Image (cartoon, helix red, strand yellow):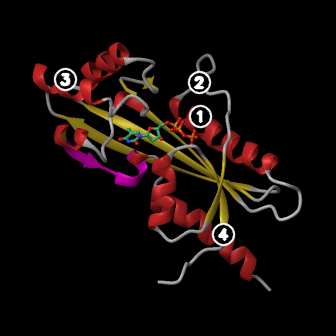
């Protein structure tokens, strides 16, 4: 299938986001961006992921040379349990605490995507509910030893071994992995429509 969308820039260091964008045939240049990911006092999880997705897209826009800029896509993912955001664990011990919070219950995964062309920005939010089985001691130990969850929000990867722990997913698999492809397609489709307008 020939690509449906124009080329873009992806403001992300995440290999998962690159793989997902490649999956839908989007050509992209990658921009290494770093934004302040600290949560603001009393900030709600949805506001937080929206703010960061937009900040990443804008930072990426600012990083491109003024000539030949491409529209920039940014995304941010947060795991939310009992209204608390679980970010990426700082070490194995914290990863263990996060897994214990997720074990035997459901949580939400929010991923916001933002696309800017320097003038306007569009955004979408994907919300999924993920249910974990109750983990056994052996499962905790094996998973923590694998190191798989250490660079992931909530200390797990749905696309990896943690699939063995997920009894139910309501929502978007790609959204949980870091880039909701349906919503991303909507943003890219709007871009295409604007381009085709006489
Ligand atoms: C819950 C979950 C998260 N993740 C990943 C997606 C994101 O890469 C990461 C969440 O962290 P983010 O801060 O959203 O992204 P990032 O720092 O990895 O990359 P960027 O440069 O774009 O800011 O967790 C999975 O890969 N699988 C999962 O099941």
Q: Position of residue 162 (x, y in %)?
A: 24, 38
Q: Is residue 104 left or right of residue 196?
A: left
Q: CA distance from mark 4 to mark 1?
A: 28 Å
Q: What is the C-alpha distance between the residues marked 3 and 4?
A: 42 Å
Dot 4 falls on a residue whose secondary structure is loop
In this rendering, the label closer to the viewer, 4 or 1: 4
Residue behind mark 1: 47
Q: CA distance from mark 2 to mark 4?
A: 34 Å
Residue highlighted by disc 2: 43
Range drawn in magenta? 167-176
> On screen, 170 above or below 185?
above
Q: Residues within 10 Å of mark 1 (few under 14, many from 20)?
A: few
Q: Residue at position x 76%, y 82% from top?
A: 197
Q: Say whether marks 3 and 1 touch (CB < 8 Å).
A: no
Q: Pick the residue in front: 70 or 40.
A: 70
Residue 68 colored in magenta in the image? no
Q: Earlier in the sequence, mark 3 or mark 2?
A: 2
> In the image, is 178 to the left or to the right of 57?
left
Query: Quadrant of residue 102 in the image?
Result: top left
User: Label 3, on which residue?
Assistant: 140
Residue at image position (75%, 42%) is 59
Image-based side of 40 in relation to 158, left or right: right
Q: Residue furthest bottom?
A: 198
List x then y, in percent, for residue 154: 38, 29
Q: Are marks 2 and 1 in contact (CB under 8 Å)?
A: yes
Measured as percent of width and height from the top left, residue 77 is found at 49, 39
Query: Residue at label 4?
Result: 7
């Amino acid at each position: 299938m020939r690509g449906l969308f124009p080329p873009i820039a992806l403001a992300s260091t995440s290999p998962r986001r690159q793989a997902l964008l490649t999956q839908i045939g989007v050509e992209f240049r990658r921009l290494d961006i770093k934004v302040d990911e600290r949560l603001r006092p009393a900030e709600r999880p949805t506001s937080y992921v929206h703010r960061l997705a937009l900040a990443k897209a804008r930072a990426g826009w600012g990083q491109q040379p003024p000539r030949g800029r491409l529209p920039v896509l940014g995304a941010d993912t947060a795991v939310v349990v009992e209204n608390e955001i679980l970010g990426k664990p700082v070490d194995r011990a914290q990863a263990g605490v996060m897994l214990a919070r997720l074990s035997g219950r459901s949580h939400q995964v929010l991923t916001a995507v933002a696309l800017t062309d320097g003038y306007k920005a569009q955004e979408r939010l994907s919300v999924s509910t993920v249910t974990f089985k109750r983990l056994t001691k052996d499962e905790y130990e094996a998973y923590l030893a694998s190191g798989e969850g250490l660079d992931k929000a909530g200390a797990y990867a749905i696309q990896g071994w943690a699939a063995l722990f997920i009894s139910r997913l309501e929502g978007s698999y790609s959204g949980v992995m870091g880039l909701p492809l349906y919503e991303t397609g909507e943003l890219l489709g709007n871009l295409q429509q604007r381009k085709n307008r006489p």
